[in-house]
Amino acid sequence: MFVRTLSVRDFRSWEAAEVELSPGRTVFIGANGNGKTNLLEAVGYLASLSSHRVSSDAPLIRVGAPQARIGASVVNIGRELRIDVELKAGLANRAQINRSPVRRPREILGILQTVLFAPEDLALVRGDPTERRRFLDELSTARLPRLAGVRADYDKVLRQRSALLKTAGRQVRSRSDLSTLDVWDGHLAEHASILLAQRLKLVHELYPHLAQAYSSIAPESRPAAIGYRSSYLPPELLDPARPPAADDQAVLHDILLRELAAARGKELDRGVCLVGPHRDDLDLMLGSSPAKGFASHGESWSFALALRLASFELLRSAGTEPVLLLDDVFAELDRRRRTALAEVAAGAEQVLITAAVADDVPAELEARPLRVSTTGEADRRTSHVESAELSG
């Protein structure tokens, strides 16, 4: 899989750009603030409908513009598709496939697969559980695009059920309040059981790839492992070495209904939903200690990189070669980690890299350079992409 062309309009710092790309390695070179990361962000957005830098779409629209547009031509096993997304401030986004509108933007998911490694990935190790849940769900959706609809439905049910808990908790709890909660419990369990089954399957399949990737990056460190953490699931379901079973979703559905009923009193008192995948976490372990709070800076970088390399290998093992996006990371890595990442990048079908200077990128990658620069006054700067030559 590779991106043949990338186009942006009024996206971040870019008023407009059309970039021709090719298989192999391409490096966008430019000083910080010139917009090179924005190009990788645009590619990543088309793959996941989200940014790795911000949680909402509003900052993606260029200041003063009413909307932004991102598009790409994607080639996969000889077949080429054009995907476009239009982002509008305060309004629903729109998408197209081969210039034809689709009902929902999430219908483009799966056409482009990417794995992005960026400085923000340290939050996977050091940040709060939201970052790790997002990592699991985005990787699961890359493998099974229909999960985007399940995630949207779960979030909607969670909001509505939480609102009912707050209302019922403040008022006298009538029989109708509780019967309505029974209905929402069923909806929550239906969607949550699908998400949980896919998360547990992903952790099981990612487990060996993560251990191998971390060992190659930091052989002198303690062994790395991952596991799924949930307060309401039995230990036997949380074992990452346990293969998924055909009836996992049904089992999880029954557990969720039981746990929701048991927690109802506490939920009404507190006005929040205490059971479900929105409360869970991904355990990252180094030896017998959690990576968060115990890993050194170098170990944290190694773990974050290992998670991304493991994701790349897992997607690749399914028969589709994802596009590898490396956002200004080589300058942050020591020689061993640079070498490990370069070895993976050298074998990928397409790698898009950003770097402040060409010397940050290992010479053995033989990357095609594109220089990114800006011109104009501070309040009207325009970014440009042009071919460049690497010295040496």
Image (cartoon, helix red, strand yellow):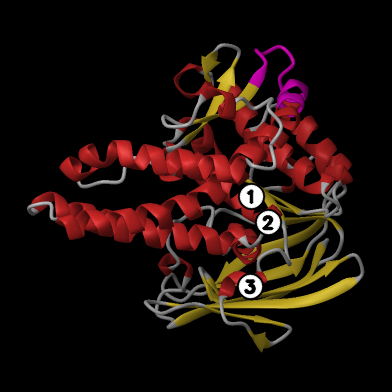
Q: Which residue is mark 3?
A: 107
In the picture provided, is 230 more to the left or to the right than 22? left
Residues under labels 2 and 3: Cα distance?
12 Å
The furthest residue to the bottom: 100
Q: Quadrant of the C terminus?
A: top right
Residue located at (79% from left, 31% from top): 339
**How crowded is the residue under tag 2: few (<14 C-alpha within 10 Å), some, or many (20+)?**
few
Q: Identify the amino acid type marked 1.
A: Ser
Numbered range of the magenta stretch? 211-224
**How crowded is the residue under tag 3: few (<14 C-alpha within 10 Å), some, or many (20+)?**
some
Name the one closer to the observer, 221 or 362.
Answer: 221
The furthest residue to the right: 78
In the picture provided, is 36 more to the left or to the right than 295? right
Q: Identify the amino acid type marked 3.
A: Glu
Residues under labels 2 and 1: Cα distance?
6 Å
Residue located at (57% from left, 74% from top): 105
Q: Position of residue 5 (x, y in %)?
A: 77, 73
Q: Is residue 135 visible?
A: no
Residue 204 quadrant: top right
Cβ atoms at labels 2 and 1 below 8 Å apart? yes
Q: Which residue is mark 2?
A: 144
Q: Is residue 352 visible?
A: yes
Q: Position of residue 54 (x, y in %)?
A: 45, 56
Say whether disc 2 or disc 3 marks the residue closer to the N-terminus.
3
- Circle 2 — which element? loop
Residue 336 quadrant: top right
Q: Which residue is mark 1?
A: 140
Q: Position of residue 80 (x, y in %)?
A: 84, 75
